[in-house]
Structures are given as structure tokens and as C-alpha cells.
Amino acid sequence: MIELLIVIVLAGILSGAIIAILFSLSGVFHSQGVRIQNQDDARTAINEVARYIRMATNSADNQTSQTNAIATASPQDLEFYCDLDGDGIAEKARYYLAGSSLKMQSVEPTWVLTPTPHWTYPAYTLDGVVVQNAVLNGANPVFRYYKNVGGSLQEFTPSTTALRQEIVTVGIALTVNEKPNLAKGNTQLATDVQIRQRYTGGLE
């Protein structure tokens, strides 16, 4: 009987250890699955933003020889002109971080006859569409801006219209974790986007 009890106890201990290992492995696999999903989601979001930034162009009413492609540029908010729908007229597009969501807004220009005929961009009337949830950048910028200095890129703060005309490359960085209780680490992805019309800092 004693030997039988010992065997039963040892079998119970061994079974408990095996079950604990299986649960641990299951948690690791689940966490890795969430991290992979985070990577896929963040990569899709970055690719979308990069595609449109790369196509940034003059606004519909631009009358200068210098491109005004970038309307506003801050660490968490980027607004630019881009022909989103391929109709030959640039819309105004905006990507911005609202809480933990990266959102996008866009607006079509309208033709105004007075005081002189010209294109104008009305204010956004709708809240932005969510491009990526669970963005955990915090104080870290989503967007960084670079200009061409002597053939190399230099990060700078484009705080004026003239400085925004010098932007040749936009850096995008996202830190994402949609399920912090399951994924033990955040997913971080980043890329740099060169604006097609600004290879040397001017309109080509």
C-alpha cells in the first residue's frame, strides 16, 4: 500500500508539472501570436501612411514654384496634399494620434468664385477613420522630419511654412500592443518615406 501511495503521489506531482509546462508553453505561443498580429497590423498601417505621404503634391490652388505639399507638420500630426482618388485634384489628408488611435481625415477642395475664382479647402467635418488602434508611442513622435543638408538628411523641426517646404523625408514610427495582458512586449515598427517631388528639397 505504501509503495502504491508513493507511486500515486509521484504520478500526481509529475502530471502537475507536465500540465504547468503545457500551460506555460500555451501562454508563450499565444503571446507570440498576438505579437505577430500586432506586427501585421502596424505594418499595414505604416504602409498605408507611407504610400500617401510618398505621393504628396501641391495643393489645388498652389501658385508658386515651390511645392506646398506639407500643410502642417508636428510629432503627432501630419497634414499634406495628395490626390487620393486619382481624379487629378489633390485632397487635403491628415494623419494624427488621438489618444491611442492613429486616425486619418481627408477633405476635397471646392471651387469658389468670389472674390476671385480659386480652390479652397473646407474644414474637416467628420472624425478621423481609425488606421491603427492601441498605439503606445506616448511622448515618442509618430512623425519625424528631415531636410537635405549637403547631400545628407538632417532631422529638424519644420515650424514655419518655409521650413515645411524643406521637408524631403518623413520618418514614421509606431509602438503597438493591442493586448498587453497577452503580449508581454510591445511591437515597434518604423520606416522613412521620401516625398517624390522633393529629392533635393525643391519641386522637380
Image (cartoon, rainbow, N blue to C red):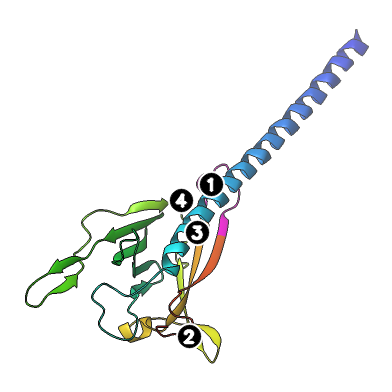
Q: Residue at x 12, y 69 (%)?
A: 112
**Is residue 71 in the magenta section?**
no
Vertical order, 156 against 79 (above or below): below
Tag 4 or tag 2, which sits nearer the N-term?
Answer: 4
Amino acid residing under circle 3? Asn
- How far across and how far down the image is residue 58, in percent? 32, 75
Q: Is residue 10 above or below residue 196?
A: above
Mark nearest the camera among 1 and 4 is 4
Q: Is residue 74 left or right of residue 107?
A: right
Secondary structure at numbered mark 3: helix
Labels 2, 4: front one: 2
Q: CA distance from mark 1 to mark 2?
A: 42 Å
- Label 3: how many residues lie within 10 Å, few (<14), some (14-19) or many (20+)? some
Label for residue 200? 2
Amino acid type of the residue that numbered disc 2 sits on in the rendered structure: Thr
Instruction: Using the image, tell me which numbered label, if any, was put on residue 159.
Output: none
Q: Give the residue type at disc 1.
A: Pro
| Image side of residue 170 versus residue 12, left or right | left
Residue 105 x/y as whole percent = 31, 58
Q: For mark 1, what is the residue?
A: 180
Q: CA distance from mark 2 to mark 3?
A: 23 Å
The segment highlighted magenta reads: 176-188
**Going by the image, does 62 lie left or right of 182?**
left
**Predominant secondary structure, magenta span:** loop
Question: Label 1 crowding class (10 Å Cα cut-off): few <14, some 14-19, many 20+?
Answer: some
Residue annotated with mark 3: 47
Which structural element holds mark 2? loop
The answer to which of marks 2 and 3 sits earlier in the sequence is 3
Give the residue pinned by disc 4: 134
Q: Which residue is located at x 56 percent, y 45 percent?
A: 37
Give percent across and percent down for residue 57.
Answer: 36, 73
**Three-letter residue code for mark 4:** Ala
